[in-house]
Image: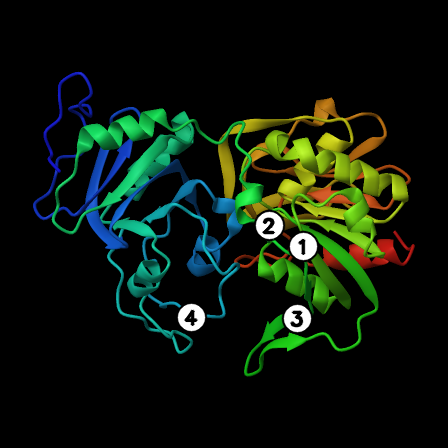
């Protein structure tokens, strides 16, 4: 491959100058080049470039299925310094397309680490860059929206910039893209693992009080652990499950998980299922993509955000109680509250930008939130929602 680029397709001249020894580059669709040092797997990946403001939990973030189709820019400069371990993962196969960091990864300095992050990235074939001006890139995303880009790592430092730029410009973006099918489980399975405890690791639910079917649009493991910790035995079904298939398990409640992509595209098959479950009267709780799909099933609509919510410090107000909770979030689409019918009540709003963060169906045990109550990473202010779901199952909500 070569660095040469023809004038018609060349990345623009204002791109960051290529430093000596650069083995990685981020090519944005507008022609911007950001040079750095490659980490993780060699190769290149295309996706939407976003940023996450969390200061901890990078391994959980990288394995969150909601990041399918995205390249994650970490605003916190020191990522990788606590290494990696087999416990802090949210799915077996990470779906993120790549990661962008400011500082080089240092050697692990945490007692739970079992391997270096760079080695962990190679194992999962994930491409990364260090040495990037992440403040500049974050401002670019904040001010102009999340761009399409190609992240590339070539140990020999040779890149076909024309081809990378063409790939960035050809990628269609997340609007209209159904990614839930790519990250969902393929077969139904049971879940009884509970939360992590120091010195003991993860526990096991011995005497479940209730049975919930979780529809996996890209579910994080810690969501399932929170349900199990609340005394709920979980049966996980694929994203494409029908209402009949869900109700065949005779659940006490149905949970709609988080996930990636455009909710309107996933809604083609998810909305009929959700409406069928609602008609049965079974209590229902949704988060993130599950929240957006519930809104679609209730007659609302969703839209792509200019800048998504991704981080562990997002303040959300509960309109019923006036309580403000700090939440963990990861979404690039949002429910349009004005589109919701009168039978639906808006329950939570973002104190950052006023966008919708929760809803409930009046008079029915059906509710959802846009954020991640399980956190992982993030504060545990919203763990009460899992108990609220149990209360709905028991007829107390």
Q: Is residue 76 left or right of residue 189?
A: left
Q: Nearer the viewer, residue 317 or 213?
A: 213
Q: Position of residue 220 (x, y in %)?
A: 58, 56
- Cα distance, mark 1 to mark 2? 7 Å
Would residue 354 be visible to someone looking at this image? no
In the depicted structure, whether residue 153 falls above or below residue 383:
above
Distance from disc 2 to disc 4, alpha carbons, whole Å, reads 25 Å
Disc 1 on helix, strand or loop? Answer: loop
Which disc, if any, is residue 194? 3
- Quarter of the image where one finds residue 368: top right
- Tell me if 376 is positioned left or right of 49 in this view: right
332 or 110, which is in the foreground? 332
Rounded to the nearest angstrom, the CA distance separating label 1 from label 3 is 17 Å
Q: Which residue corresponds to mark 1?
A: 382
In the image, which disc is placed on residue 327?
2
> How far separated are the C-alphas under marks 4 and 3?
18 Å
Precedes in sequence: disc 1 or disc 3: 3
What residue would you read off at disc 4?
Answer: 85
What is the secondary structure assignment of the residue under circle 2?
strand
């Amino acid at each position: 491959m070569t660095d040469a680029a023809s004038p018609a397709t060349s990345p623009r001249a204002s791109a960051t100058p290529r430093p000596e020894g650069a083995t990685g580059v981020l090519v944005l669709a507008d022609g911007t080049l950001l040079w750095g040092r490659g980490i993780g797997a060699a190769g290149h990946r295309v996706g939407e470039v976003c940023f996450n403001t969390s200061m901890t939990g990078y391994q959980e973030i990288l394995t969150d299925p909601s990041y399918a189709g995205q390249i994650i820019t970490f605003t916190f400069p020191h990522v990788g310094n606590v290494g990696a371990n087999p416990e802090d993962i949210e799915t077996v196969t990470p779906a993120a397309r790549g990661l962008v960091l400011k500082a080089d990864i240092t050697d692990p300095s945490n007692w739970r680490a079992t391997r270096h992050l760079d080695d962990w990235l190679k194992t999962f074939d994930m491409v990364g860059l260090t040495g990037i001006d992440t403040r500049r890139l974050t401002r670019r995303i904040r001010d102009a929206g999340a761009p399409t880009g190609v992240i590339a790592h070539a140990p020999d430092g040779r890149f076909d910039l024309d081809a990378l730029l063409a790939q960035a410009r050809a990628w269609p973006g997340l609007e209209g893209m159904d990614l839930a099918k790519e990250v969902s489980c393929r077969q139904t399975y049971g879940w009884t693992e509970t939360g992590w405890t120091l010195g003991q690791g993860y526990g096991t639910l011995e005497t479940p009080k209730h049975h919930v079917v979780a529809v996996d649009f890209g579910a994080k493991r810690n969501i399932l652990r929170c349900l199990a910790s609340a005394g709920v035995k979980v049966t996980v079904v694929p994203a494409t499950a029908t209402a009949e298939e869900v109700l065949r398990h005779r659940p006490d409640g149905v949970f709609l998980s988080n996930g990636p992509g455009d909710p309107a595209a996933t809604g083609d098959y998810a909305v009929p299922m959700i409406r069928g479950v609602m008609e049965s009267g079974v209590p229902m709780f949704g988060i993130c993509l599950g929240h957006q799909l519930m809104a679609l099933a209730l007659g609302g609509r969703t839209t792509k955000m200019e800048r998504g919510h991704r981080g562990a410090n997002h303040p959300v107000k509960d309109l019923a109680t006036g309580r403000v909770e700090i939440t963990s979030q990861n979404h690039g689409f949002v429910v349009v509250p004005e589109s919701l019918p009168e039978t639906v009540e808006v329950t939570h709003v973002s104190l950052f930008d006023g966008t919708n963060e929760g809803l409930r169906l009046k008079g029915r045990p059906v509710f959802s939130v846009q954020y991640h109550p399980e956190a992982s990473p993030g504060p545990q202010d919203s763990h009460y929602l899992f108990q609220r779901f149990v209360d709905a199952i028991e007829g107390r909500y």
